[in-house]
Each structure stands twice: as C-alpha cells, then as structure tokens.
Image (tube, rainbow, N blue to C red):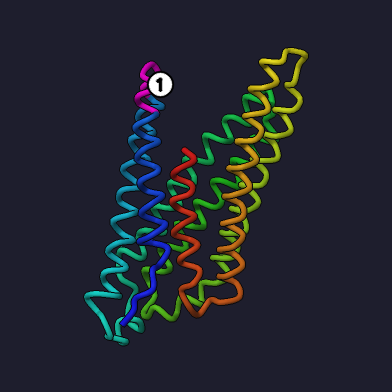
Amino acid sequence: MVTLPSFDNTLGALLYGVFLVQVYNYYRRYPSDKAGYKAIVVLLLLLETAHQAFIGHTVYWYSITNFLNIAALFGKPVWSLVFQVLIEAVVAAVVKFFFILRVWRFSYGNMWLTAFLLLLDLGQLGLAIYYTVKIDQLPALPDLVNLRVVGIITLGIGVLNDAGIAIALCYYLQKMRSSHTQSNYLIRNLTLYAVNTGALTSAMSLATLFVYNFMPTNFVFAGCYFVLSKRRGTLA
C-alpha cells in the first residue's frame, strides 16, 4: 500500500528546519540585540517546537495508532489537534505584532493605521481562541463543519491583516526614498521583503480560506493551515 505524503510531516518539517536555521543565524549575526528581542525569538522557537510536536502527534494518532479505525474519525477530536490551533494563533499574533511595530515606525507614529492593524491582530487571536474552545467541546470530529462561519471569519481577518501590513510597509518605505543611492538600495530590499513575505502569507491564508469554505467536510484545508503556521514562524 502506497502512502501519499502530507503537508504536515513533509513541508511542515522542512519549514521547521528553516526556522531553526533562522534562529541560529539571528543569534550569530545580532548578538548585541536587546534582551527582549532575544526572548521573543526563544518564545517563538518553543511555540513552533510544541506546534510541530502536536501536529506529529495528531498525524500519528489518526494514521498509526488508529490505522484503519474509521471510528476514530467520528469520535471527539484528539487533544493535539485542538491545541495546535491555539499555538498557531499565538505565533501569528506575535509575528504580526512586530510587523505592525514596523508600520508604526515607518509611518512616523500613525496611530490610526497602527490601531486598525493591531485591532485586526487581536481580533483574529480572540476568534482563534474562541474557535479552539469550541473545537474542544465538539462531540465528534465531523461536527467541525458547524464552526465553518467562525473559521471563515477568522481566516478572512487574517488575510486582511496580512495584506494591510504589506501594503502599509510598501507605501511608507517608498515615501522614505531619497537621492542617496545606498539608502534607496536598502529601501528597495526592504520593500521586496515586505512584498514577498506579505504576498506569500496572504496567498496561503487565502488558500486556506478558500479550501475551508468550499470543502469543510474534509481535512484538505488542514494541509494549507499547517504550512501557514510554519510560514509565519519563518517570518519572525
């Protein structure tokens, strides 16, 4: 019997490895950074490690422990599947918060824009926590379809926030362009970074939203969602 690879234990594992390399490079290249920034990196590393472990446990539970046990798919969701949603939401909120701080700095303290993006960030986190609680209360895994509205709203807010952050960063970076070639080179690189990170994250969020909306009765969306969580971790 040929077992097809899944996103969580293939791309998910690879992206986790990329995240570990980024953590190593951060501490090697920026040893003089503030202790607060270093602590946040450690926090994200611990959260991503826990998230990867929960995904692994979920896959092992349904594909190994309950191999050919169809009843497991109709029982109460396994605990690791529930809590990985919460961890991803916390990682996303922390990463977006730091991008919002960049928007605040580049916009020279635009409070209205910063407050709007922060509200979206906190709103998505709050809805994700609510979603996690509701999943834990489900009597059976197929009942997950009953939470589709909450899930769609949560993912939609995430897409809006990701796009808003990317657009704001690009706009204010372009306003900072000057007659100095070296400064323009740095601004151009930062703009490309903002576009690439924002576009990729928004595209994966949109893909998750699309699949979850049109195929809520299967777990195709979970593959996109697991990759999305790892993608956010690599942006920290």
- Out of 143 and 60, give the one closest to the viewer: 60
Residue located 49% across and 55% down the image: 228
* Magenta stretch holds residue 34: yes
Q: Position of residue 68 (x, y in %)?
A: 28, 85
- Quarter-wise, where is residue 153 in the image? bottom right
Q: Position of residue 106 (x, y in %)?
A: 66, 25
The amino acid beneath tag 1 is: Tyr
The magenta span reads 26-35
- Out of 11 and 173, give the one closest to the viewer: 11
Residue located 47% across and 40% down the image: 94
The residue lying furthest to the front in this view is: 2
Residue at mark 1: 30
Within 10 Å of the Cα at label 1, are there few (<14), some (14-19), or many (20+) other Cα atoms?
few
At mark 1, the secondary structure is loop
Determine whether, in the image, residue 215 is placed left or right of residue 87. right
Residue located 36% across and 68% down the image: 136
* Magenta stretch holds residue 182: no
